[in-house]
Image: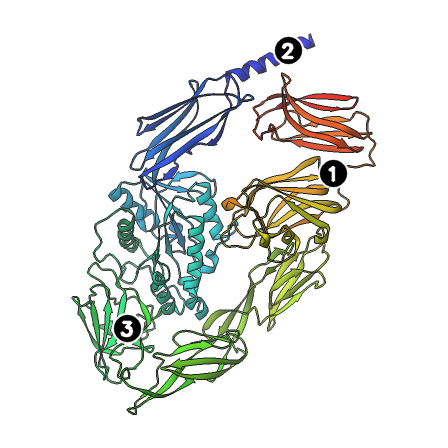
Amino acid sequence: MKTYVLLLVSLFVLKSLSLCQTVFFASFPQKNQLYARDAQDSASVTVSGSVTSAGSDSVTLTVLKNGGFYQYYKQALVYNADSAPFAFSARLHAGLASYKFELRVNATLVSSADSVLSGDAYLVDGQSNAATAEIYDYPKIAFYSPWLRTFSLSDTAWHRSITSSWCLATHIIENDSIPVCFINGAVGGTSISQHQRDTSLSSIYGKIYFRITRAGLRNGIRAMLWYQGEAENGDSLYNAVGYATSFKAVHDAWLGDCPGIQHFYVFQIRPGCGSGFQDILRDCQRRLPNLLSDVSLMSTTNVADRNADNCHYLVTGLHELGDMMYRLLARDMYSSTDTVHITPPNIQKAWYVDDERTRLVLQFDQPVLLPADTNMKKFFAVQREWNVADSLSADTAAHTVTLYMRNGAAEGDGVSYIPPEFDPFTGLNYNGPWLSNTRGIGPLTFFQFPIENKDPYDSLTALSMQAFAHDSVLEQYDTTRVSAVTAYSTGKIDTTEKECVYTSLNTFIATVSVFGQVIAKNTGTARIRVSKRGFLDTVSIRIVSTTALLDSIRLSEHQKNVALIGFTLKATGYYRKGDERFSANIDTVVNWVSGLPITVSVIKGVVRHVAGNSPAPIPVVASLSGVSDTCLVTAPWLVPRTDMRLSINNTYSTGFSAAYVFDSTRASWLSSAPPPQPLDIAFTQSYRITKLFYLPWQDNRLNGVITQYVILRSLDSVFFDTLASGAWSLDLAQKEAVFPATDARYVRLMAMSANNGHVNADEIGFQRADTSTTSIMDETMPLPTTAFSVAPNPFNPSLNITCALTKAGDDLRISIFSIDGQKIRTLHHGHRIPGRYRVIWDGRDNAGNLLASGIYVVALNGPMLSLQKKVLFLK
């Protein structure tokens, strides 16, 4: 009776399997997904996978468009070991059309996805004026459209969106009839340093990168929009003058990760949000297109409806920003013919009309209009002196604005438009008046724009030049200016910086800008060389310790593993001097101390692993003037580099030797062949290990960075167990793979995929496990004569096969067979010494193909030994 019941159950299970189909999808659309259109105004959608249960003849894909038939595909199923692959490629025309996908096996619907779109995708980054989540009057700008999408970080799924940055989606959908997706990762109150490339999910960049990657848009982002800078200043001149370099790093990173980006659209910030040096930072933004040809700018100066906080915008202002930016997008992306005066006016030239300097002419790249408010004349500065003009006039035909200079006005070689943040006459936040073009767009603000031509000294012969500093003694982090006294043959004397070329002879102590602005960095004597009209002179400035109060120090890292080659800590000091607050890089000033220098050393922020290990994190402290910050450094117990050897099948050239992988330098190995590539590491003795560290070649092109891996271990270089598998992010950060503690004499790192058709490694290391951990081979254990087990059973995704041998065997085989006796996989064939062993089967055949669900036989065969066990693989 018992046998009869078991037979009925078995028949019921087999009958059920025959009535249902198991389908594995490698690629299938999500509900609400947007696919980025290509140059042919369409998007390719791949549907692929395999039917993993036998008995079906065909698979069909039906695509519906707006509820009606659009496309139909059919493919016959050809089985290989109960698995039949299929693949379709559908083309979706971009437009206001909703597509639905239906996949059937025979006539049975197995999967569907509706509301699928083809359109454009944009990336938005910056701070609060770009972050839709922080928009004031959010409900008033909601835009309910079936053609607007976003991709969520929280559930990694596509969703309809009800708003977009600056209401741009409204324009694109209504004017150009294109569905659109915005991936917005802006975060309020963040500096540009917080937006630099870091693909970990703890960073701003990493969160955006994750969303774009999971959304399948790495090659589909058409443009990036950027509104950031208010928080970047932080009352720091360093941050302001370095903005262009920082933005270029962001620009280059996103262009590398999203190569389909065609344009970068940048808003120049306007005065407000409570930070200093904004005039300098805004001018850095104004000059970005000179540095990066794919950058287009939009000003914000003449935008109305500012919030009471003088930082953000209300509904009308948001719409106005969107209207202006959309015209640029429409010109570049949607072939708009509306191109007249859609850009902000940008100054091209400034000159004095006469030798007496009574009229200063500013020429723009398009007509500029004066406001009705005559106070506009007060907000031009020469040499940082405001209110230099008695009146203004504009010539729209010549694209000029003329300043009629008042008597006694400052003379100089640079003119500025709009104060940094506050009205210099009232002390209130500056909110106009503004210049504008014929469409109401304000000009880009400028700082110390060079005044040229009609200089009374241009035609004179210089007899001598002597440079001088406006301050001979300077505190750290303060600034001064270096000028030059030039004597001419007519007896005239010039005391400006015009035509001067500046060079700092010791940038460790001080740097100098092209305008002669000296920034003190460290104590000592700064020497600034000045050249002009063939004359050379050098100025010495004594740099003394700052009298500003150091409020805090912040290190770039607070927890870090020093496993392979070490790392560099950056120290930022936050100072207070009267009402002024600023930050400065103080790497070379602070005192660096390691809590355990015999294990971890630190010199000027460079942290290195010396020797040994520590059971607890080692504090590395940066201190100055009683203020400090700490980074806890983990020094793991490593397999010694001298005990490791690497065998690799190929090397790109002699300059990329395999020996470099264990040399603790920046020299690296690079393959000449694409992945998959095995990296075979042999230890001089058996070590118990629990973690692998991998540091990619520190090359910004990311050539050869391993992105998918499998790690195997062996005691004899023949019989390998799989320890771990997974994916690593495509960046230059140190990677690691963790696995249960195990004894190993040989380790194979299989690079299953890597970037750009190569495989690389700068350093590889292994963390040793606590010796109290149980080994998978224990020669002291009693060994049953025929110990042979499999677990778990049923299994998914892997099966542990263990056996214990009391005698050595020259012909031991572990194999996998189908239920009808066909050999599918050989897991081991060769000599084994007595001991307890384990091998892991991943459900694949010898060709690496994942098998279908079903019953398989595990066979252990050897001299006078033949054991078999049935296992059930369920997916």
Q: Which residue is denoted by mark 2 in the rendering? A: 7
**Which is nearer the N-term, disc 3 or disc 2?**
2
Name the residue type under label 1. Asp
* Residue 31 position within the rendered picture, expressed as x and y whole percent measured from the top left: 40, 33
Q: For the residue marked with disc 3, what is the amino acid?
A: Phe
For label 1, the SS is: loop
Side of 349 relative to 548 (left or right): left
- Residue 295 position, x and y percent, is 34, 57
Q: Residue at x 79, y 33 (%)?
A: 833
In the rendered view, tell whether residue 158 sits above or below residue 494.
above
Could you tell me residue 566's position as x and y percent? 62, 58
Quarter of the image for residue 728 reads top right
465 and 189: which one is in front? 465
Q: Nearer the viewer, residue 578 or 777?
A: 777
Q: In this view of the protein, can residue 217 be seen by the observer?
A: yes
- Position of residue 516 in the picture relative to residue 431 (left or right): right
Q: Nearer the viewer, mark 3 or mark 1?
A: 1
Q: Residues within 10 Å of mark 1 (few under 14, many from 20)?
A: some
> Is label 2 in a helix, a strand or a loop?
helix
> Are the residues at dot 1 and dot 2 in contact (C-beta closer than 8 Å)?
no
First-in-chain label (1 vs 2): 2
User: What residue is pinned by disc 3?
Assistant: 379
Check the picture and name the quadrant holding the C terminus: top right
- Pointer 2 local density, CA inside 10 Å: few below 14, some 14–19, many at least 20: few
**Three-letter code for the amino acid on which mark 2 is drawn:** Leu
Q: Is residue 304 left or right of residue 770?
A: left
Q: 10 Å neighbourhood of mark 3: few (<14), some, or many (≥20)?
A: many
Q: CA distance from mark 1 to mark 2?
A: 45 Å
What residue would you read off at disc 1?
A: 716
